[in-house]
Image: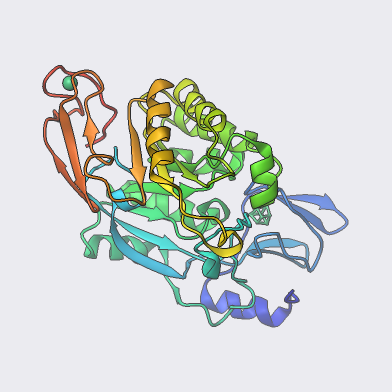
Amino acid sequence: MVQVTAQIIKKLDEQGALKEALLAYELGGGRIQCNICQRRCNIDAGGVGYCKTKINFDGVLYDTIYGLISSANADPIEKKPVFHFKPGSRCFSVGSLGCNFRCDFCQNGQIAYSDALQNAGGCKSHITPEALVQLAQTHNCQGIAWTYNEPGIWLNYTLDCAILCKTLGLYTVYVTNGYATQEHLDIIGPYLDVYRVDIKSMNDSFYQKLIKVPSVKGILDVAESARHKWNMHVECVTNIIPDWNDSEDNLRKTATWIANNLGPATPWHVTRFFPYGKLSHIPPTPLHTLNEAVKIGSECGLQFVYLGNVHSETGENTYCPDCGNLLIERSGYAARLHGITADGRCNADNTDINVHL
Ligand code: SF4
Ligand SMILES: [Zn+2]
């Protein structure tokens, strides 16, 4: 653990990476609670939060990753994956350092579990919100996505950027594990268009054993709020891991919860797991399991269930749930619109397909 010193503070400040953290509540005796994500860390003077991006220095809680960019790319929005919002558009995708999860199978561990403090002064690039928006526009992107690491710990920066995006007509996307607090969502809610959230399992034991998080409930509550309180476009992803979350019961519970609480037109992406990290011994998800998940999703009332991380001729296409009309054809990350009206309906029978063009 790096000790928080005046020197580190100075370095981060010179980089422009240091900001007084939002949602910090004083607990007395120099302790501060961070309420940016559901871990709600209580941080002693001189201490660091679980994600290693919040520090308590001299009784003030600081965010240490403002504008620190570890990865940036102009991506098709389909790559997030987001299939029903501005299909075929490009979004400028950026990530920083740190995460509030510790998934045993994380493929972004190098940045997600990297220590922002340790990297102080040496970290990649610093990009102001103004420069980020400019970069997005230069790369012909219609929006910005916070992804790669967890945006749910990056509120100071995502908020300033999202406000700017809204003044300039760019859309905004969180690609998230869903562990931001309700308070976090209420701050960024007015400026966030898309909430692409993982629902990894409906079993708390999955979250406890593989992720070191006590329960899925808070994730579900905040996803509901994104959809209904803030009217965001929501899409869900479940990466199906053999023997961990692939039971029929769990898949049915997940699909039913999405259909009942976010709505049957919510896209659900069921993606193939590949062995990685501490789960290197587990084989890739069998194709029949993925196909079964698609079937289960549909039986549970979901109108748009997509296959991910696997080659499929039709598993990524959008069909009208009523007449079967092919509406969006996807191949790789390219999307071709076929029979959709300008207000996102099937042009054969006017069915609303929850697509925002
Ligand atoms: S963002 Fe979450 S993990 Fe990080 S310090 Fe705050 S409460 Fe803890
Ligand atoms: Zn139709």
**Residue positioned 49% across, 48% down in the render:** 176
Q: Is residue 137 left or right of residue 231?
A: left
Question: Ligand 2 is in which quadrant of the figure?
Answer: top left
Location of residue 211 in the rendering, given as x and y in whole percent from the top left corner: 64, 51
Q: Image quadrant of residue 350?
A: top left
**Residue positioned 46% across, 77% down in the render:** 124
Location of residue 317 in the rendering, given as x and y in whole percent from the top left corner: 23, 38
Q: Give the answer, above or below, for where 107 lies relative to 204.
A: below
Q: Give the answer, above or below, for where 200 lies relative to 15.
A: above
The quadrant of the picture occupied by the N terminus is bottom right
> Of 39 and 238, which appears nearest the observer?
238
Location of residue 26 in the rendering, given as x and y in whole percent from the top left corner: 78, 51
Location of residue 60 in the rendering, given as x and y in whole percent from the top left corner: 72, 62
> Which residue extends farthest right?
29
**Residue positioned 44% across, 23% down in the render:** 259
Q: Give the answer, above or below, for where 92 lies relative to 264.
A: below
Q: Is residue 290 left or right of residue 261?
A: left
The quadrant of the picture occupied by the C terminus is top left
